[in-house]
């Protein structure tokens, strides 16, 4: 079982993406536990403040040290965590390889960035890895946390009924997925390739590999370089 603790100033944003489909199925089967923690519960003063102005001047607010340290240290007193992940625009680009690695862990903390970011001392003392889901800026790390969680969940054995399906997704072998078809075999004159109806599975696998390489070469040549 994997346990994921997500720390956020807007935990309600996670209710829908983590409460349906594959993620909910994983929770229902007891294969993954997900807990959200409202950082404002650890806030300072009567207004539960979690942010403050930037030292040295400049626009935007920064998430304070004290609430984040209190939340993460409290969790770490209860169990050992394999990863404490900070979701931020300048982190390592998230990919299938990283999803595979995280799916093998037992306990993970995800800290959702907000405002102008978090105090650097948190990154230096508590964070074990930093993840970005793309070269753009979101209002907060909640959507990124949902993306990473979903990518992890579907790899846990037993979550997807056809486990082979997850292993043949795009990026698992460094290639994009080949075209797929289903019934009817002929729709308004648009036909499924004859080879896929032939029953010659060796030739079909060769065709799929050729198509995957072609699509990857056309759309993501950078993957072939890697």
Image: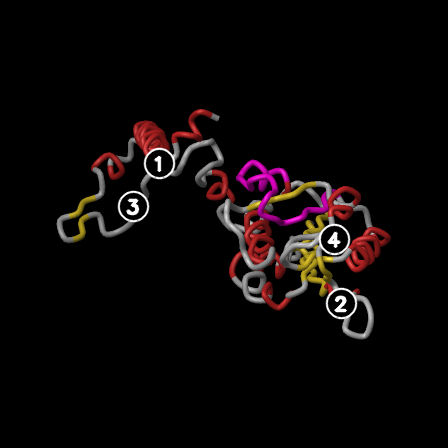
Find numbered disc 3 in the image and state the secondary structure of the residue it sits on. Answer: loop
Q: Residues within 10 Å of mark 1 (few under 14, many from 20)?
A: few
Using the numbered discs, state the Cα–Cα distance from disc 3 to disc 1 in whole angstroms: 20 Å
Is residue 9 shown above or below 109? below
Q: Residues within 10 Å of mark 2 (few under 14, many from 20)?
A: some
- Residue that extends furthest to the left in the rendered view of this protein: 189
Can residue 201 be seen by looking at this rendering? Answer: no
Front disc: 3 or 1: 1
Quick one: label 3 or label 1, which is nearer the N terminus? 3
Q: Nearer the viewer, residue 147 or 123?
A: 123
Residue 55's disc is: 4
**What residue is disc 3 on?**
181
Label pair 4/2, CB-CB below 8 angstroms:
no
Name the residue rendered at 35%, 37% in the picture.
Answer: 178
**What residue is disc 1 on?**
219
Find numbered disc 2 in the image and state the secondary structure of the residue it sits on. Answer: loop
Find numbered disc 1 in the image and state the secondary structure of the residue it sits on. Answer: helix
Quick one: label 4 or label 2, which is nearer the N terminus? 2
Counting from the top left corner in percent of width and height, residue 197 is at 25, 39
Quick one: label 3 or label 4, which is nearer the N terminus? 4
Q: Residues within 10 Å of mark 4 (few under 14, many from 20)?
A: few
Using the numbered discs, state the Cα–Cα distance from disc 2 to disc 3 in whole angstroms: 53 Å
Colour approach in the figure: secondary structure
Name the residue rendered at 76%, 48% in the picture.
Answer: 122
Using the numbered discs, state the Cα–Cα distance from disc 1 to disc 4 in whole angstroms: 44 Å
Using the numbered discs, state the Cα–Cα distance from disc 3 to disc 4 in whole angstroms: 57 Å
Question: Magenta region: which residues?
Answer: 82-101
């Amino acid at each position: 079982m994997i346990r994921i603790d997500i720390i956020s100033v807007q935990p309600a944003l996670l209710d829908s993406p983590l409460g349906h489909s594959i993620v909910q199925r994983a929770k229902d089967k007891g294969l993954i536990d997900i807990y959200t923690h409202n950082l404002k519960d650890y806030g300072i003063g009567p207004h539960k403040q979690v942010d403050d102005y930037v030292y040295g001047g400049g626009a935007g607010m920064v998430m304070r040290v004290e609430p984040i340290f209190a939340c993460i240290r409290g969790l770490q007193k209860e169990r050992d965590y394999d990863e404490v992940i900070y979701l931020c625009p300048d982190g390592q680009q998230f990919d299938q390889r990283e999803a595979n690695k995280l799916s093998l862990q037992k306990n993970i903390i995800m800290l959702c960035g907000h405002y102008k970011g978090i105090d650097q001392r948190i990154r230096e003392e508590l964070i074990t890895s930093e993840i970005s889901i793309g070269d753009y800026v979101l209002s907060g790390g909640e959507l990124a946390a949902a993306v990473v969680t979903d990518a992890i969940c579907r790899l846990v054995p037993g979550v997807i009924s056809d486990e082979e399906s997850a292993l043949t997704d795009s990026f698992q072998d460094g290639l994009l997925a080949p075209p797929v078809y289903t019934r009817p075999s002929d729709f308004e004159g648009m036909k499924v390739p004859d080879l896929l109806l032939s029953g010659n599975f060796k030739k079909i696998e060769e065709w799929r590999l050729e198509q995957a390489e072609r699509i990857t070469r056309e759309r993501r040549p950078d993957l072939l370089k890697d």
